[in-house]
Amino acid sequence: MNDRPAPDSPEAWLQRARSDLALARTVVDSGEVLREDVCFHAQQCAEKALKALLIRLEIPYQRTHALEMLLDLVKAAGVKIPQDVDLSFSLTQYAVETRYPGDWEPITEEETRSAIEMAVTVLRWVEGQLGG
């Protein structure tokens, strides 16, 4: 028996968002996982949560990792977004750029913990919007 929700449902996207958050939280202090990868999962949590909301609102969106684009769609639908959720656009930097070896400043422990907190904020807000 498959207990997963339908793939095109908000519930399926929330399930994936929660999974990404759990991964980030589980490995943040492992010492074996790069901070960039932890931040990637934080970004993915926020992205998938926002997509769940857009699905519920029946707002089409393009395939994107850019949280600012998703947030703009939610705003255009007349949904008031709290400032701490609106600031989550900064997680977008962890979606692509830092996923591969590159020349950027190392991500600090503080930035990593902030990314996780931001993901939690977005997820909890979306859950509230969806009634659970």
Image: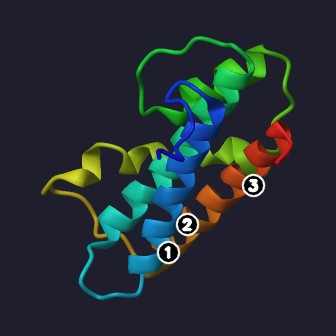
Q: Which residue is drawn at 42% across and 26% down?
A: 64
Question: Residue 105, percent across and down?
Answer: 28, 65
| CB-based contact (under 8 Å), mark 2 and mark 1 | yes
Residue type at tag 3: Arg
Residue 121 badge: none
In this rendering, does residue 10 appear at all? yes
Residue 32: name its quadrant.
Answer: bottom left
Q: Which of marks 3 and 2 is nearer the N terminus?
A: 2
Direction from residue 22 to residue 99 in the image, left or right: left
Q: In this view, does 59 lie above or below 96?
A: above
Q: Which residue is drawn at 47% across and 46% down?
A: 1
The answer for how far apart the CA atoms under marks 2 and 1 are is 7 Å
Q: Is residue 32 above or below residue 126?
A: below
Residue at the disc numbered 1: 25
Residue 124 badge: 3
Q: Which of marks 1 and 3 is nearer the N terminus?
A: 1
Residue type at tag 2: Ile
In this rendering, does residue 89 appear at all? no
Residue 116 badge: 2
Alpha-carbon neighbours of circle 3 within 10 Å: few (<14), some, or many (≥20)?
some
Q: Residue at x 55, y 38 (%)?
A: 13
Q: Which of marks 2 and 1 is nearer the N terminus?
A: 1
Q: Residue at x 64, y 22 (%)?
A: 55
Residue type at tag 1: Arg
Question: Residue 43, percent across and down?
Answer: 47, 50
Q: Is mark 3 on a helix, strand or loop?
A: helix
